[in-house]
Image: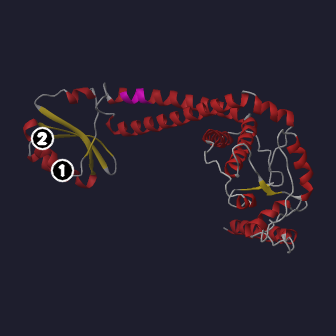
């Protein structure tokens, strides 16, 4: 059924005094967003094959099971567990990246034997630690030596030298100028205690524990993924609720009555009457076409051709008096798409 909004509905044009509710169902929208995010997350940890295919994009379930999932608490609990697990994985991934970065940052300084807090406890001298690019290293060391400053190289790679610079407090300003000219990158051990090797060992232990916890969280995500059908059912339920609320919000209404105007296939009209009859204070009637009103177009094809309807809808629906081109497009699309894949495969083989 295609439900028209107030702007397109003919009843709005005949009775312009009808009102439209503008309040959005934010709680339902939030729930749909949460469910979509959790389903996407669980799919990335799924261990079993996706039961849906191109020709069968939906999973068939019984009405009883659908009602149980929607009315029960299990799906909501699963959603909350999924969100907690996703947050835990994000936290552990961030912690792992931070620890790995800290480990790589400390690695050049592991040959320092003294506790790093001693570097902050000097009274008459200033101790600076940092990295000097290789192309500026000799000139920087020479400039520091002229000032009477001592430089100890801790380690070096092909491009950087890890150094400790010690100078009297009186010449610290001049030393900073020389270091800036040498593109010196300061490294701070603020908040750290013990030797660099001890800090590295502690960092490695934390990193190992984090990796173990991360694997446990991923395993839990895989277990939760096996039950994601419940979330998909609940998502369909809330998407339907949202569609219903959006239709109600945009439909013309009085203080006590909502008027839903739309189009339905002739073969579906009896089913609509039966559905509406199940609700009290509700009725459905056919109305005459208004002058100049256009009839929407819908296409129907055999199950084997139905997947190719997407192509027709993509390029534009035929007019009401035209022939449905889907059945003619299907074999040619399949043929030429297959040729494209074949040529690509042949090209890869030749490479």
Q: Indicate whether residue 153 is drawn in magenta.
A: no
- The relative height of residue 159 versus residue 339 in the rendered view (above or below) is above
Q: Look at mark 2 in the image and give the residue it sits on.
A: 172
Q: In which quarter of the view is residue 2 placed?
A: bottom right
| Rendered image quadrant of residue 153 | top left
Q: Nearer the viewer, mark 2 or mark 1?
A: 2
For image coordinates 68% across by 53% down, the residue present is: 18
Instruction: Please provide percent x and percent y for residue 254.
Output: 70, 47
Q: Nearer the viewer, residue 287 or 64?
A: 287
- Is 120 placed left or right of 319 in the picture? left
Label 1 belongs to which residue?
A: 140
Q: Position of residue 231 (x, y in %)?
A: 71, 37
Label 2 to label 1, Cα distance in Å?
Answer: 15 Å
Residue 200 is a magenta residue: yes
Question: What residue appears at the point 46 percent right and 27 percent down from the top-left corner?
Answer: 206
Q: Is residue 15 above or below residue 341?
A: above
Q: Which residue is located at x 28 percent, y 40 percent?
A: 187
- Mark 1 crowd level (few <14, some 14–19, many ≥20, 10 Å Cα): many
Please provide percent x and percent y for residue 35.
Answer: 66, 39
State which quadrant residue 233 falls in: top right
Dividing the image into 4 quarters, which one contains the C terminus? bottom right
**Magenta part mainly helix, strand or loop?**
helix
Q: Is residue 110 left or right of residue 346?
A: left
Give the quadrant of the N terminus. bottom right
Residue extent of the magenta highlight: 199-203
């Amino acid at each position: 059924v295609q439900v028209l909004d107030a702007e397109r509905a003919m009843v709005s044009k005949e009775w312009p005094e009808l009102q439209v509710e503008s309040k959005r169902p934010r709680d339902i929208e939030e729930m749909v967003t949460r469910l979509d995010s959790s389903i996407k997350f669980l799919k990335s940890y799924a261990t079993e094959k996706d039961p849906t295919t191109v020709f069968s994009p939906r999973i068939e379930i019984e009405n009883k099971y659908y009602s149980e999932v929607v009315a029960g608490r299990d799906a909501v609990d699963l959603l909350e567990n999924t969100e907690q697990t996703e947050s835990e994985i994000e936290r552990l991934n961030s912690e792992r990246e931070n620890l790995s970065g800290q480990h790589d940052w400390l690695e050049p300084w592991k040959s320092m034997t003294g506790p790093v807090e001693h570097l902050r406890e000097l009274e008459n001298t200033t101790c600076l630690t940092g990295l000097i690019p290789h192309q500026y290293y000799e000139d920087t060391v020479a400039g520091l030596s002229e000032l009477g400053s001592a430089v100890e190289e801790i380690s070096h790679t092909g491009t950087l030298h890890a150094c400790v610079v010690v100078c009297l407090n009186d010449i610290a300003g001049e030393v900073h100028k020389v270091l800036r000219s040498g593109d010196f990158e300061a490294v701070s051990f603020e908040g750290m205690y013990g030797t660099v090797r001890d800090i590295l060992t502690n960092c490695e232990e934390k990193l190992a524990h984090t990796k173990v916890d991360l694997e446990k969280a991923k395993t839990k995500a895989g277990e939760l993924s096996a039950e994601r059908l419940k979330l998909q059912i609940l998502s369909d339920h809330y998407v339907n609720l949202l569609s219903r609320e959006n239709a109600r919000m945009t439909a013309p209404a009085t203080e006590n009555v909502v008027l839903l105007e739309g189009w339905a296939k002739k073969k579906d009209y009896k089913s609509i009457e039966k559905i509406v009859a199940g609700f009290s204070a509700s009725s459905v009637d056919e109305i005459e076409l208004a002058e100049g009103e256009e009839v929407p177009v819908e296409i129907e094809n055999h199950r084997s051709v139905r997947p190719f309807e997407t192509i027709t809808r993509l390029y534009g629906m035929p007019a009401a008096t035209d022939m449905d081109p889907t059945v003619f497009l299907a074999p040619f699309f399949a043929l030429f798409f297959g040729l494209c894949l074949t040529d690509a495969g042949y090209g890869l083989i030749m490479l």
